Image (tube, rainbow, N blue to C red):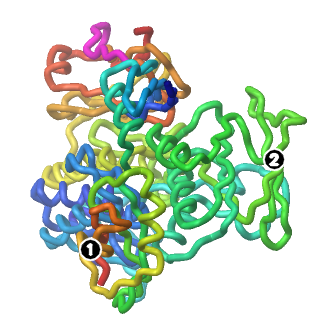
């Protein structure tokens, strides 16, 4: 069995940033395992611009953003294996993986960083009635076909769901000559970024129907059309509002799910809201020495924040290895939430291990206007920030500092509360 | 007098902005809640621009790649988006391609080059 200090599962944006940060923190014996034929993950097919504004202060496309990090990995000569599928992770940190060159093999790691990303929710999860013809794709599959394989999935398109990938694909398919007839969104608001609604739909006159969903799919071999109807406040279709659209393609952009089969198999505790591991301030899961970052932990809007989070996970994994896997007695305080947040990452904080600065990220459950985000350490309010608007589609964050914790040596409770402005 | 309605992209608030124009000049901006909204609305009605991204075919790739992604090196007038796409239709470039290589110079007469955004060997 081969031994590595830190093994990173997945070579997308999170895995690359984690590897570089772990290396720079002094741990040189790092290995990245990637199932695709190249590093960079989903960024390779995200050819649109808008990446890197926070990290590099310039607007890059997905492949350009990935290349910046891949170069950092290759400059440091960090080891990676491509076309390698991880089959199993054991609680003792034994990784079972396979590829064509090495066959089936095992690696003993001192620390593991989970950076497997997420995948798209599929039609099966939606219970749309109708036939099951060809021509129904997830938006990400269509993105790969158009941008990587150079193949157009269809010409007459209906899109269900207004997630960012769906919006981006509405524009992409339009530019490549397809007619995108409508984007239907079951919620009364879009889950996508405003900028994408304007630049991907409004620019091309593509209608966005909020509180609408697909209620029927027609066509036996290939989809020939679908029916869209308005929904009431319980998301039930309203009879009499049905509208028929002829189409040869239906794209689904209906949410992303962190990919945690390996984590679950290992026995890592998962959070029911995020579907990602429950982590502490070190982004460490319920198994000591196993860390998580990026979309496998909770789905992000911006890759910049994935990189930032993964760098923290990389540094923390390096510190764990440097300490010989010995952890001081932990004093994990759960982060309580009230008035809006659905979850927080991290879910618990040990003030001693919080570092100089700790970013806590969360999402709210609905559109909220004229509110404020407040953090209470015991009964003292240490953060108060006005938020004119918050929406489920845009991740929120608060920054906690060493100085805040130092003023509360016997801290018992940490609370993040959304209150009136 | 002409009125234009816009959605601001500055933040998730997405203010609905109404711009009043006369002879191509902005007379009034209403509905924005901050200075960024005002600036966005004025640019958007007088000189809207976009970066255009796409992909073109490659040949001779050692890795079996069939496309390389590309973008306009800087933003171009919004009205030229489709002209840019038409101008690169059918283009096929030889490998290797490096980030920044010119795929099509002065695309659609915009004075801006279409450049590769990926290394393809």
Asked whether A386 falls inside the magenta stretch, the response is yes
Q: Tally the marks.
A: 2
Other residues around mark 2 within 10 Å, as few (<14) / some (14–19) / many (≥20): many
The label number, if any, that marks residue A230 in the structure image: none
Q: Which residues are magenta?
A: A377-387
Q: Residue at 64% of width from left, 43% of height from top?
A: A207
Q: Is residue B52 above or below residue A271?
A: below
Asked if the residues shown at circle 1 and circle 2 are in contact, with their CB atoms under 8 angstroms apart, the answer is: no
* Residue holding disc 2: A215
The label number, if any, that marks residue B102 in the structure image: 1
Q: Position of residue A196 (x, y in %)?
A: 47, 44
Q: Nearer the viewer, residue A110 or A65?
A: A65
The reply to whether residue A14 is in sight is yes
Farthest-out residue, right: A240
Answer with left or right where residue B42 lies relative to residue A210: left
Q: Residue at 56% of width from left, 62% of height from top?
A: A173
Q: CA distance from mark 1 to mark 2?
A: 46 Å
The label nearer to you, 1 versus 2, is 1
Q: Residue at 79% of width from left, 58% of height from top?
A: A246
Q: Residue at 30% of width from left, 30% of height from top?
A: A349
């Amino acid at each position: 069995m081969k031994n590595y200090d830190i093994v990173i599962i997945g070579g997308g944006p999170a895995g690359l940033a984690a590897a570089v940060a772990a290396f720079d923190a002094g741990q040189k014996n790092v290995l990245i395992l990637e199932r695709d034929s190249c590093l960079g993950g989903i960024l390779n097919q995200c050819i649109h611009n808008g990446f890197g504004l926070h990290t590099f202060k310039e607007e890059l496309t997905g492949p350009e953003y990935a290349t910046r990090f891949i170069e950092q990995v290759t400059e440091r000569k960090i080891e990676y294996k491509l076309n390698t599928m991880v089959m199993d992770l054991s609680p003792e940190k034994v990784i079972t993986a396979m590829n064509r060159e090495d066959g089936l093999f095992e690696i003993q790691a001192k620390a593991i960083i989970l950076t497997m990303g997420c995948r798209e929710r599929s039609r099966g999860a939606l219970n749309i009635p109708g036939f099951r013809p060809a021509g129904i794709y997830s938006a990400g599959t269509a993105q790969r076909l158009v941008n990587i394989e150079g193949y157009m999935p269809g010409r007459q398109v209906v899109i269900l769901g207004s997630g960012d990938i769906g919006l981006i694909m509405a524009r992409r398919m339009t530019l490549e000559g397809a007619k995108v007839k409508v984007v239907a969104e079951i919620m009364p608001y879009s889950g996508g970024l405003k900028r994408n609604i304007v630049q991907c739909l409004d620019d091309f006159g593509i209608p966005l129907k909020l509180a609408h969903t697909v209620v029927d799919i027609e066509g036996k071999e290939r989809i020939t059309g679908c029916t869209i109807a308005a929904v009431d406040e319980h998301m039930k279709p309203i009879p009499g509002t049905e509208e028929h659209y002829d189409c040869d393609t239906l794209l689904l952009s209906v949410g992303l799910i962190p990919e945690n089969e390996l984590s679950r198999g290992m026995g890592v505790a998962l959070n029911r809201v995020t579907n990602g591991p429950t982590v502490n301030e070190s982004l460490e899961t319920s198994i000591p020495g196993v860390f998580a970052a990026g979309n496998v932990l909770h789905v992000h809007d911006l890759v910049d924040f994935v990189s930032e989070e993964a760098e923290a996970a990389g540094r923390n994994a390096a510190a764990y290895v440097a300490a010989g896997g010995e952890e001081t007695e932990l004093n994990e305080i759960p982060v309580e939430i009230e008035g809006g947040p659905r979850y927080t990452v991290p879910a618990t904080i040990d003030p001693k291990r919080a570092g100089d600065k700790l970013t806590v990220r969360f999402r709210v459950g609905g559109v909220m206007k004229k509110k404020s985000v407040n953090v209470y350490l015991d009964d003292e309010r240490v953060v108060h920030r006005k938020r004119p608007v918050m929406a489920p589609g845009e991740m929120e964050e608060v920054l906690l500092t060493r100085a805040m914790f130092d003023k509360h040596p016997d801290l018992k409770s940490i609370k993040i509360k959304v209150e009136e402005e | 007098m002409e009125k234009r309605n816009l959605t601001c992209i500055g933040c998730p608030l997405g203010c609905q902005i109404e711009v009043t124009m006369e002879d191509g000049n902005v007379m009034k901006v209403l509905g924005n809640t901050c200075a960024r909204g005002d600036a966005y609305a004025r640019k958007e009605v007088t000189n809207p621009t976009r970066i255009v991204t796409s992909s073109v075919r490659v040949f001779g790739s050692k890795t079996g790649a069939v496309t390389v992604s590309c973008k306009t090196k800087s933003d171009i007038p919004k009205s030229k988006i489709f002209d840019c796409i038409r101008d690169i239709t059918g283009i096929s470039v030889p490998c290797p391609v490096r980030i920044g290589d010119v795929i099509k110079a002065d695309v659609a007469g915009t004075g801006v080059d279409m450049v590769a955004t990926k290394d393809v060997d």
